[in-house]
Image (cartoon, rainbow, N blue to C red):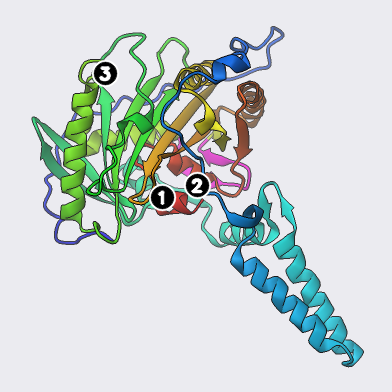
Amino acid sequence: MTDPGATRAGVRINAPAIPQPRPIPAWQPAATAHPVAAPPPEPAARSAAGPPETTSARPRPLGGIGVLQIMCWQLVLIAVVLVIGRPWPAIAAVVLAAAIVLALTAVRTRDRWLYEWLALSWKYLLRKRDRDLRSADEAGRALLRLISPESVWLVDDVGDDVVSMLSRAAGISAVLQPRTTARAPKPMPPPETMLPPLSEQAPAFAVQVVHHAGFSQAHAPRVWLTLQVLRTVEVHRDAEVRQALGNAVRRVKRQLRRGTPTRGLTEHEVLGTISSLAHVTADRSRIREQWRLWHTGPVSQATFELEGWPGLSPAVATQALHRLLAAAPHAAVTIAVTAHRSTTDAEPRVSATMRIAAANLQALEHTTQVLTGLARGWGIGVERLDGRHVRGVAATLPIGRSDAQQDR
């Protein structure tokens, strides 16, 4: 929960306006071959020395079978035994109910149980899926309110910088951006290398690196770094979390000073970045969610979870990232790599999410096929987040982790 007393302590800082995204070029299928990146590395390259051992998700016992599923099966067995010898209408009703329960809890498709798909579909049908942000004062602020209604902005002095911090239910985050304007800046280190060192006093922490390649290949991909202190039972008040985040910002800025010096973004700059990355500026203020797509005005978008990313070495992950960002000249690609560690985790947990935006559905599906094939060549699985594109969009914006991501 957000500390109400602390959330009103900040003063908003005015900053230069964020440049609006360039118009999306129309796309037509070309007769020439689609530019695809160089082939993936040999298996030997994948075994190169990498970062600390990571896992993409907590291992679940019994092949992912939960305790509630086992309890359901036990209740089904008891019900079938008790109904033996009863009148046939009772037997038929129990058998039908047992068959439905077994199907929902025992049948698995696309890495999810049927009851999970049922819950996901129910949530999708219940929420509002068509919104217009045009009446809002700022599209970025309205979109943030849609994704995270409880969010509140704070302002804090961190060294020589005035840093805007975003307070949410999951934690408080700050966004940094490289100062360099070079055409080919040095790559940002893997997020797991910027986590605080293990200690009893270390808070639960997350580091998110967002990479974005726009529709114009003439401009180099851009990158944002989000540092987030996650709330725990021990550390949950805004004052405590802000202090831990301020210390983390100082530490990471010192760590990056030589290779990639950074600066903290103001509230205005972060909101402008959010609206630009989500393509909700200009005439794209209407948001429509479909099961397989997320629309902002005429722009069609889809989000994907990149499975197997934690198993890549830093060198291979950097190459794969550059290839994925450069292989879609008719679309905008955003890839967010997030590493987090709780107070009980010995090793960081890493996840990666990709979002593709295109001028029309045909260009989007074509780009999806190209990038999916390219990712699989690197040993990366691509799971389309059907029914969960709201979560996918949030995961690719520089706002840190959310409670929904923690449950994913």
Q: Which residues are magenta?
A: 283-297
Q: Whole-percent x and y of residue 195?
A: 31, 36
Q: Secondary structure at mark 3?
A: loop
Q: Indicate whether 347 appears above or below 356.
A: below
In the rendered image, which residue does mark 2 sit on?
Answer: 390
Q: Nearer the viewer, mark 2 or mark 3?
A: 3
In the rendered image, which residue does mark 3 sit on?
Answer: 260
Q: Is residue 247 left or right of residue 112?
A: left
Do the CB atoms of the residues marked 2 and 3 lie less than 8 Å apart?
Answer: no
Q: Residue at x 29, y 41 (%)?
A: 198
- Label drawn at residue 147: 1
Do the CB atoms of the residues marked 1 and 2 lie less than 8 Å apart?
Answer: yes
Marked residue nearer the N-terminal end (1 or 3):
1
Q: Indicate whether 262 appears above or below 101.
A: above
Q: Is residue 192 visible?
A: yes
Neighbourhood count class around disc 2 (C-alpha, 10 Å): few under 14, some 14–19, many 20 upward: many
Q: Nearer the viewer, residue 242 or 303?
A: 242
Q: Secondary structure at mark 2?
A: helix
Q: Indicate whether 232 appears above or below 318.
A: below
As shown in the figure, which amino acid type bears the numbered disc 1? Answer: Ile
Q: Residue at x 40, y 46 (%)?
A: 133
